[in-house]
Amino acid sequence: MSHGGRWRIGLMLALIATTVRLAWTLAVPTIPVGDFATYRESAIYLAEFGHLDAGFVYMPGLIWLLAVLHALGGEVLAAKMLGVLFGGLAAWPLYIVASRLLVNGQRSQPGQAGLSEQPGRPGLPVQPDLTGVARSSGGAALVAGLGYALWPAGIALSSVIGTDIPTAAIILLALSLLCSWGDTRPLLASAAFGAAMGVAAYFRAVALPLAILSATYWWVRRVGLRATIGRTALAMSLTVLLLLPWGLRNRRQSGEFYLTDSHGGITALMGNDPNTEGTYSRSLGAMFLRLTGRTFLTEPHRETDRVAYRLAVQFMKFDPAWTCAMVALRIERLFAPERGLLYWSVYRPGVVPPATAAWFNQHRPVITALADWYYLLFVFCLCAGLAFAVVDRRWSVLVPLPFALTLAVTYALFVAEPRYRVTTEVLLFPIAGFGAWRFGGAAVLVAQRWWRIAARRSRIASVVGPPSGRDEAPDADAPRGLAATAATVAFVIVGSLALGRGGAALRTRHRWAATVWQVDGRPELALWRGGTSVGGPSPVWGAPPGAVLRIGPGQGRVDAEIILPDIKSARGSFQMEASLGWRGAEPGGASVTIGGVSVDSHAIAVRGSIEQTRGPLRIGAHLDRPAGADGFLEVVISEVTLTTAGAP
C-alpha cells in the first residue's frame, strides 16, 4: 500500500470517528460539571484577564484552546467540539501507526524471500515480497481504526471535554511521525516525535517522560546502540525545547523553573489517603490545612505540592502492605469494566438534564452491557495481539506497549480513576487490531486444516472435495498463536482475580487511619493501626476528623496503636482529652483504654506518664466488648487534645 493510500484510509477512519462523536454530542446535551467546568472557568479567566488564575495548577494546553474559543465567542458547544475533533482525528494517526508497525514487524513467511544475500551480489540483501504483508497489515490496521472509531465509551466521552483524549491523540500523532519517517529520514522522525510529545505534555505532564520511549522503536528496528541513543536524545531535546516557554513562565510566576504542573504531590496524597481508599474527600483538605496551614491551591504552588508529596510519602511508608494493596486497587480502577467511563458523560448527577438522565437510566442495563462486552472483546483481541506478536516475533507491533504501561504504572503509584485509563487504552488499539486480524486468520486456517483432515477420512471426501477451491499458504505459527492467546487470556483472568482478592484481603488486614491531634497547642499527625489483631480484620477505620475502633462478632477485645511520628521524645506526665461516639451494640460495660487508662463514657480525660527518649511517640489503645453483648460495636475517637509535661 502506498503512503498516499494509507493517509486516505486514515482520513476515512477519522471521518467516521468524528461523525459518530459529533452525532453523540449533538444528541446528548451534556452540562459542564467536574473537571469540564473547572477547565472552562480557567479558560474564561484567561481570556478575560490575559493570564492564568492564581489557583491554576495544571498544564495549560487545553485551557489555551478553550480560551481562544471563548474569545471568539464560543460557548459550551464549541468547547465540546474540541472533544469531538480530538477524539475523531485520533483515528487517523492510530491507523498509520498500526499499518506502519505491522509492515516493519513482518518477518518473512514460508514461500517468501527472506533477507538473504542476492545471488551473485554478496552483501546486498534481497528485500522480501511485501505484497501479502501489506494486505495483512492493512486489514489489521483497518480493524484497529474501526475498533477505535466505534468504541462506545470513547464516543460517550467526546461530549465531556478533558485532557485524556487530546493527550492520546497527540501521542499517536508523535508515533505516526516516528513510524512514517523512521526508515527514510530518521533524524527528522526523531525531531518530529519529540516536538509532538512536547505538545502532548502541554495537555498532560505525564507525557513528558514518555519521550524517552522512542528508544523502543529504534531498538526493534535494530539501528545500533549509538544511533538509538543519539536519536532518542534528539527527541527528548525537542520535547524539552518546546516546553521551555512554560518553564520560563513558571520561573517568572513562582521563582522556580520547572516544566510540569504543580499538583503531582497533591494527587499522590489523594491517592494514598487511608481514610477514603484513595478518593478525593474534603476531609483530606481540612487535614492538610490543619497540618500545614495551606490549602491545596495556596501559592507558591510548587512549594505546596512538595509539602503534599512529603506527606504522601509518609503515608506510603507507614504500612507497605497497605500501600501495595492500594496499588492493586488503583489497577482495578484503571482496568475495570467500561461502565465506569459512562459515569462522566451520562450517569454522574447533574451531567445531563433530568429528561435525558431518565432515558439513560431506563435503558441502563443495555447501555452498560454494550460498553462492558465491547471492552471484553477489546481485552481478548489485545491478549491475542500480545500472544501473536511474541509467537511471530513481530516486536515492532509492541512499540505502543511501553507507552501504555508507563502511563498505567504512573497512575497505579499515585492516583487512579476509571477515566485515567483512556489514554492507555487508546494506545493499545493497534495491538488489539493486530490481534483480532491475526487470531481470526489463524482460526480460519486451523479450522480449514481440520476440515480437510476430516474430509479425507470420511466416505464423502470424494464427493464434497476440499472446502475451498485452493489451499491457503501454510501458517505454522497459527496453532502456537492460538495456544498462546488462550494462555494469555487465562493469565489475565487468573491475575485479575488474584489481584482483586489479594488486594482486598490486604486492605482488610492492614487498614489504618490518619487524624490530626492538638498536641501542646500544635496540630500533629496521629497515625492509627491495628495492634495484636494482625492476621484478622483491622480494628481501625478512618472517620474524619476522628478514627474508629471496631470490634466484630466473636471478639472480646481489639488492640490498636497510635503513633505520633513528629514527636520524637517526651518524658513526664500527660493529659489527653477526646470525645467518644458509640455505634452498634449497646455500649453498656464497654470501655476504651488509652495510655493504660480505661474510660467508658462519651468523653475521656486520661492522665498518665510518658517515658520516651527516642523515636515517635506511641500510645496503646484497646476496645473491650461488654459482657453478654454481640454484633458490631464501634467507638469514634475525635477532637483529641494531648498535653505533655513541660508544655506552656
Image (cartoon, rainbow, N blue to C red):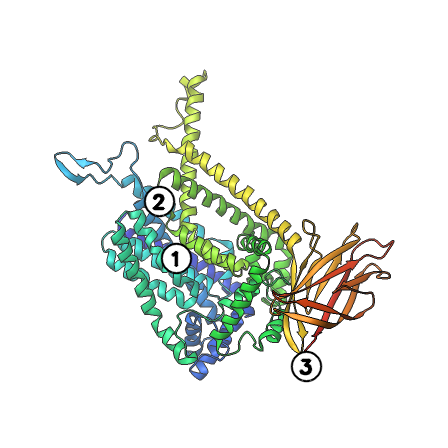
The structure residue drawn at horizontal position 53% and vertical position 46%, both measured from the top left corner, is 376
Residue 436 visible, this orientation: no
Q: Nearer the viewer, mark 3 or mark 2?
A: 3
Residue located farthest toward the left when viewing the structure as drawn? 120
Q: Where residue 399 sits: x, y (%)? A: 37, 50
What is the three-letter code of the residue carrying label 1?
Ala
Disc 1 + disc 3, Cβ < 8 Å: no
The structure residue drawn at horizontal position 69% and vertical position 60%, both measured from the top left corner, is 561
Residue that label 3 marks: 648
Residue located farthest toward the bottom when viewing the structure as drawn? 49
Circle on res. 395: 2
Residue 65 visible, this orientation: yes
Disc 2 secondary structure class: helix
Report the front residue among 477 and 244: 244
What is the three-letter code of the residue carrying label 3?
Pro
Circle on res. 14: 1
Spatial CA distance of label 3 from label 2 is: 69 Å
Assign the C terminus to one quadrant of the image. Answer: bottom right
Q: Where residue 532 sits: x, y (%)? A: 70, 53
Disc 1 secondary structure class: helix
- Left or right: 481 with respect to 635? left
- The number of discs equals 3
Q: Quadrant of residue 317?
A: bottom right
Q: Nearer the viewer, mark 1 or mark 3?
A: 3
What is the crowding at mark 3: few (fewer than 14 residues within 10 Å), some, or many (at least 20)? few
Disc 3 secondary structure class: loop
